Image (tube, helix red, strand yellow):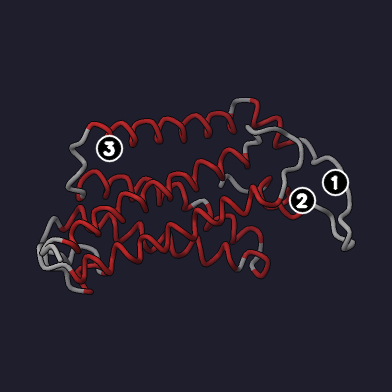
Amino acid sequence: MNQHFWWYLARATGIVAWALATGSVLWGMALSTRALGSRPRAPWLLDLHRFLGGLTVAFVGVHLLSLAADSYVEFSWRDLFVPMASNWKPGAVAWGVAAFYLLVAVEVTSLLMQRLPRRIWRAIHLASYVTYVLATVHFLTAGTDSGLVIVRLAAIVSTAAIVFFVAYLLVGPGRAASARPSRPVPRSTNGGTAGSRVTRSLSKSPT
């Protein structure tokens, strides 16, 4: 095994985790702003948003395990979970630690959405924006691949896309669309309303 295997794995999983987190945020915003259309959406569209978020947590977990196992830059568990504890780029690593805690909070409350007051769930879910910012700063300051043109381009494009969706929701067509009541949805065979749960949850959350 290459002596730098764990370092390479940490770099790769970090990049993938950032890309998945970005995709989850953008997909959630596309749904909540109704940029994909005002009609009720199929449940799998929301499931895809949640799947991307869960996959992000999984890759972040592998990223942390790889850093702990690596001997190229030695990280203790304290370095990985306590901001400013690392001797290697402490500020840059701290951004990632903060992003991790917010990511976990968003994912846990998403799983418990039906058991939490809507106001609390929505307030915590808004942290998705902050998570993206923290993760991107960590990605660009701690990542050894941040100097690559494609990496910087990806950060610029994703940030521009998020700014677009925010503007779309606040001052664009998304503002009027989100204010309109949802159309009636045909009932499913089990007596429920197909897609109603998706419409309710997305109409009240930006992600």
Q: Which residue is mark 1?
A: 185
Please give left or right for residue 65 compared with residue 87 in the image.
right
Q: Where's residue 172, x and y in %? A: 61, 25
**Mark 2: few/some/many CA within 10 Å (<14, 14-19, 20+):** many
Q: Amino acid at mark 1?
A: Val
Q: Amino acid at mark 3?
A: Val
Q: Disc 2 residue type?
A: Gly
Q: Which mark is residue 195?
A: 2
Quarter where residue 80 is shown: bottom left
Secondary structure of residue under mark 3: helix
Q: Earlier in the sequence, mark 2 or mark 1?
A: 1
- Reading the image, the residue beneath label 3 is 151
Instruction: Give the residue displayed 20% in from the left and 44% down from the top.
Output: 145
Q: Residue at x 11, y 59 (%)?
A: 88
Question: What secondary structure is marked by label 1?
Answer: loop
Which part of the image, by quadrant, shows the N terminus?
Answer: bottom left
Going from N to C along the chain, the mark reached first, 1 or 3, is 3
Question: Looking at the image, which residue sits at the far top?
Answer: 172
Q: Secondary structure at mark 2?
A: loop
